[in-house]
Amino acid sequence: MKEKTFERAIHKWDDWHDSIERSRKLLGYDPKWPEQESITWIESNIASIRKQGKNELKRLELPPTLQQYWEDCFYSDYRDKNGNVNLSKITRRLSEFKSLPSLPCDYGLVWYDDENIDDPWLRVELRIHSRFVVKELLDRNNKHTRKSITRELFEYASKNAFMTLEGALLWKGTKPHPLCQWLKGGRPPINEERALECARLADEQGMTEVDIGKRFKWAFQEDSYGKWTQCRTARRYIQKGRQLKETGRT
C-alpha cells in the first residue's frame, strides 16, 4: 500500500477529523490565522501539541507512527469554503512540502549480537501494528509482470508471514482497526450513532441537510442552478437514521 492510499483512508474516517477539530478548540488554535501568527503560536505551544497528538492517537487506537501526520493536519487549513478536504493543503508544519502519513509498519535487516554479519542467511524483521494486519497493507499494486528471483522470494516469505500473523491474531481475537474499512476505497460505512443524531436534528429541530452538513463539515455539491445547496452525505445519514428509528434503534 502507498502512503497516498493510506492518507485517503484516514480522511474518510470521521473520528480523525473530529480529533483534529476538537484538539484545535481545546488548545486554542485556528488554522486560518496568518502564517507568521500560526508559526509563532506553534513554537510557543509545541509541547502541548505533541502531548495532545500522542493522547489522541492512543485514544483512537492508532500507531504512534502517525504522530507527525496528525500534527501536520492540526496545523493545516485543508478544507475549502464548501467543507471539502484538499489533501494537497496538508504540509509539513506549514511549509511547502507535502505531508504524508507513515504506514503502520516498519522493516529492515537485523543481526543479533552473536551473529556473523557475513553469514549467507539474512534476517529481515517486519514490525506491523496488530490492528492493521490486512492484505491491503502488503499490496504494493505493482503492475510489472516480470519479477526477479529476489522479489519472488521476498513475496513468498511475506505472504507466508502474513498468513502466520493472521492466524495468531485470529486466535487472540484481535480485530482490524475501523480505519481499515476504507483501504479498498469506495463509500465509507455509516456511523449509526451519528445517523440517529442527524435524523433527530432534521425531524425534531428542523435542520436542513445543508445545516447538518455544515455542522459536521461534510462536503457540498452543486444543484442544477450551480449553487452549493446540496450535501449528499447529510442526506444519506438522515435517511439511515430514520430507517434505524423505524426498526426500533434509538
Image (tube, helix red, strand yellow):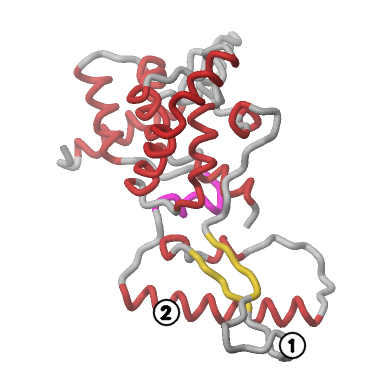
Secondary structure, mark 1, is: loop
Circle 2 residues within 10 Å: few <14, some 14–19, many ≥20: few
Circle 1 residues within 10 Å: few <14, some 14–19, many ≥20: few
Residue at 84%, 73% in the rendered image? 146
Residue 9: image location, x then y, percent = 52, 45
Residue at 55%, 26% in the rendered image? 76
Q: How many marks?
A: 2
Residue 54 lies in magenta, yes or no? no
Give the number of the disc on residue 45. Answer: none
Residue 22: image location, x then y, percent = 35, 28
Image quadrant occupied by the N terminus = bottom right
Residue range of the region highlighted in magenta in the rendering: 178-186
Nearest the viewer among 125 and 221 is: 125
Residue 238: image location, x then y, percent = 32, 28
Position of residue 205 relative to residue 76, above or below, is above
Residue 173: image location, x then y, percent = 31, 71
The residue under label 1 is 118
Secondary structure, mark 2, is: helix
Residue 180 lies in magenta, yes or no? yes
